[in-house]
Image (cartoon, rainbow, N blue to C red):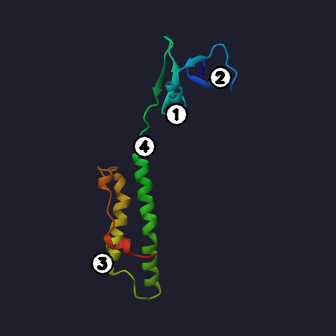
Amino acid sequence: MKYATFNEDGSLQYRLIEGVHDIPVHAVKVADELWFRLVNEQDGIWRLEADGTIEKELLPAVLPDYVKVERAWRDRELQTTEWLTTRHRDEQDISRPTTLTREQYVELQAYRQSLRDWPAAGAFPELAERPSAPPWVAEQVQ
């Protein structure tokens, strides 16, 4: 036989098995199918209702903080492309031919600026409206 005990507020306290646990007098006998659900379904709070039934109260949905998620993505993108900017400037400083063309460097800087401006854009934080990196950026080897 399987049992459950409940707190004063009606929430599930313990799941007990006769022969394995001491069964308190206030424990409620539960059928095998319900026992399986009590053990495995973790998406809510099981409660003993006033009428003696055991029901699950679903946990409220937690929505992600899209603004925070998108700002983190934007910050990673800026960090990921920083080395291209640094390399280009270093190559210029030592009068070496640059790996990026002048057009690529301008395009990179425009992309990085669009990342900085994006949180102020009306479409922020819509995923589909993220600034797009120039296609050649993915081909660069760090």
First of labels 4, 2 by sequence position: 2
Task: Report x, y in % for residue 96.
Answer: 43, 88
- The quarter of the image holding the N terminus is top right
- Marks 3 and 4: CB-CB under 8 Å? no
Residue 70 in view, yes or no = yes
Q: Which residue is mark 4?
A: 64
- Tag shown at residue 142: none
Could you tell me the amino acid type at mark 1? Asn
Alpha carbon distance from label 2 to label 1: 19 Å
Q: Which residue is mark 3?
A: 103
Which of the two residues, 128 or 44, is positioned nearer the viewer here? 44
Could you tell me the amino acid type at mark 3? Glu
Which of the two residues, 46 or 134, is positioned nearer the viewer here? 46
Alpha carbon distance from label 4 to label 2: 42 Å
The image shows residue 27, relative to residue 36, as above or below, that is above
Which of the two residues, 120 or 48, is positioned nearer the viewer here? 48
Could you tell me the amino acid type at mark 2? Glu
Labels 2, 3: front one: 2
Q: Which residue is mark 2?
A: 18
How many neighbours does mark 4 have within 10 angstroms: few (below 14), some (14-19), or many (20 or more)?
A: few
Alpha carbon distance from label 3 to label 4: 38 Å
First of labels 2, 3 by sequence position: 2
Task: Report x, y in % for residue 23.
Answer: 67, 19
Labels 3, 4: front one: 4
Q: Which residue is mark 1?
A: 40
Labels 3, 1: front one: 1
- Secondary-structure class at tag 1: helix
